[in-house]
Image (cartoon, grey):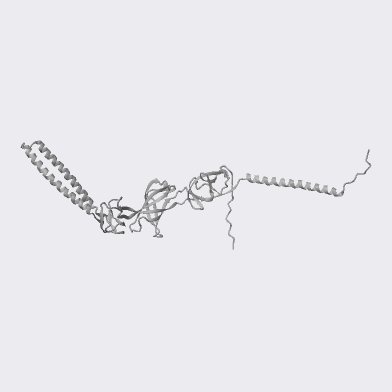
């Protein structure tokens, strides 16, 4: 049975609200589609950029110097130096040479008064005289017994005993005479003399000072140095030890002579590295006929080491530090990257020397990306020509 009530039409306000909701939903759907399309396009661009080979520039290489300069501190020492101690006990009687005096071998430096030694020598000489007298009488008696035994006036045993007594007394005399010579030799050490030609560089005693013999109980009295030539000792780092050899020329400077250079020649090496500093001790020698060089002085030694023609100098920005050393990225055939391990020499701050691992013909990438690996393909950046000078 059909209703008799009429259907009410929708109100205009509700119809408008429905239309607005529909429009908003359609706009949201359209905006979401646009955003998704934009994101997809951006990701596609990033993927394409990641797949494109990186663009790199080459580092400017330079050959190593024809002559390397190695500057190290040195220690100047006399060619010969002797610390002089006393050989006898006593008191210093006088000294004849002071510091700075030029002396020759055998020249007297000082005299020691040794009364105890003098008394010992006098006593031993008296003992020698007694031993000599005993020997003389024993020898005379033995000669007489030798004559009497031929005439059978004394027995052979008596003659033999006399001869043995003579030999014993001669041995006593010889031993006493040796003691006399020993004390006489010690008495000669009462005069302290220079061992060689040189300069007195130390006097550590004065008149009346107690003198003890030997270097253990006594003190150093004088020091004589031969400064006509000098020895220069230098500790050379292990990295440069292979470049040194006897005959190598060098120059050195001293603070008291600014701007003046002295010549030296490397004469020998220790051939053993110091385990603490890993350095090699080398000895140079230089002429000092003018006496300008002083023992114990500091100097700066400039070694003139022949350069290696295969040594390469490159910017520090081309280095790639790794766990076990340093690598560089080299551009090979087909713009393929090859990572090479290198050994470094001197560091100049903005550039370094490569002693092994590179040749001057290698194309080294400057500021290589950290992600580069051997076999990666790269693009070489175009070289920008220098700008032309504009006319005024």
Residue 244 vs residue 335, the one in the foreground: 244
Residue 299 vs residue 290, the one in the foreground: 299
Relative image position of residue 153 (x, y in whole percent): 5, 37
* Residue that appears at 22% across and 52% down: 117
| Relative to 272, residue 193 above or below | below
Total labels: the figure holds 0
Residue 332 vs residue 221, the one in the foreground: 221
Quadrant that contains the C terminus: bottom right
Residue 51 vs residue 224, the one in the foreground: 224
Relative image position of residue 270 (x, y in whole percent): 37, 47
Quadrant that contains the N terminus: top right
Residue 183 visible? The answer is yes
| Relative to 154, residue 380 above or below | below
Relative image position of residue 262 (x, y in whole percent): 38, 56
Relative image position of residue 160 (x, y in whole percent): 11, 38
Residue 108 visible? The answer is no
Left or right: 215, with 119 as reference point: right
Left or right: 9, with 184 as reference point: right
């Amino acid at each position: 049975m059909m209703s008799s009530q009429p259907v009410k039409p929708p109100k205009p306000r509700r119809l408008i609200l429905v239309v607005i909701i529909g429009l908003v939903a359609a706009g949201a759907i359209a905006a979401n589609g646009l955003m998704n399309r934009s994101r997809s396009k951006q990701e596609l661009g990033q993927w394409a950029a990641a797949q494109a080979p990186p663009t790199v520039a080459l580092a400017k290489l330079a050959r190593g110097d024809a002559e390397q300069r190695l500057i190290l501190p040195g220690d100047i020492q006399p060619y010969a130096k002797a610390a002089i101690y006393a050989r006898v006990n006593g008191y210093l009687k006088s000294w004849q040479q002071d510091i700075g005096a030029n002396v020759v071998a055998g020249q007297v430096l000082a005299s020691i008064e040794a009364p105890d030694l003098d008394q010992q020598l006098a006593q031993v000489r008296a003992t020698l005289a007694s031993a000599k007298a005993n020997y003389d009488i024993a020898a005379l008696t033995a000669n007489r017994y030798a004559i009497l035994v031929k005439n059978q006036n004394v027995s052979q045993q008596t003659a033999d005993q006399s001869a043995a007594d003579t030999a014993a007394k001669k041995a006593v005399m010889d031993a006493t005479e040796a003691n006399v010579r020993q004390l006489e030799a010690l008495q000669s050490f009462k005069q302290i003399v220079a061992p060689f030609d040189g300069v007195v560089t130390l006097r550590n005693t004065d008149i009346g000072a107690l003198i003890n013999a030997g270097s253990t109980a006594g003190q150093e009295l004088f020091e004589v140095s031969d400064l006509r030539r000098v020895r220069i000792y230098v500790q050379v780092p292990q990295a440069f030890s292979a470049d040194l050899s006897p005959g190598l020329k060098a120059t050195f400077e001293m603070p008291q002579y600014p701007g003046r250079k002295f010549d030296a020649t490397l004469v020998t090496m220790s051939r053993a590295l110091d385990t603490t500093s890993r350095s090699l001790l080398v000895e140079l020698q230089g002429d000092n006929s003018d006496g300008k060089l002083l023992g114990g002085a500091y100097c700066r030694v400039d070694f003139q080491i022949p350069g290696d023609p295969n040594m390469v100098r490159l910017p520090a920005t081309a280095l790639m530090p790794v766990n076990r050393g340093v690598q560089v990225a080299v551009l090979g055939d087909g713009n393929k990257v090859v990572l090479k391990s290198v050994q470094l020499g001197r560091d100049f701050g903005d550039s370094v020397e490569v002693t092994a691992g590179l040749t001057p013909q290698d194309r080294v990438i400057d500021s290589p990306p950290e992600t580069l690996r051997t076999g990666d393909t790269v693009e070489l950046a175009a070289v920008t020509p220098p700008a032309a000078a504009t006319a005024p």
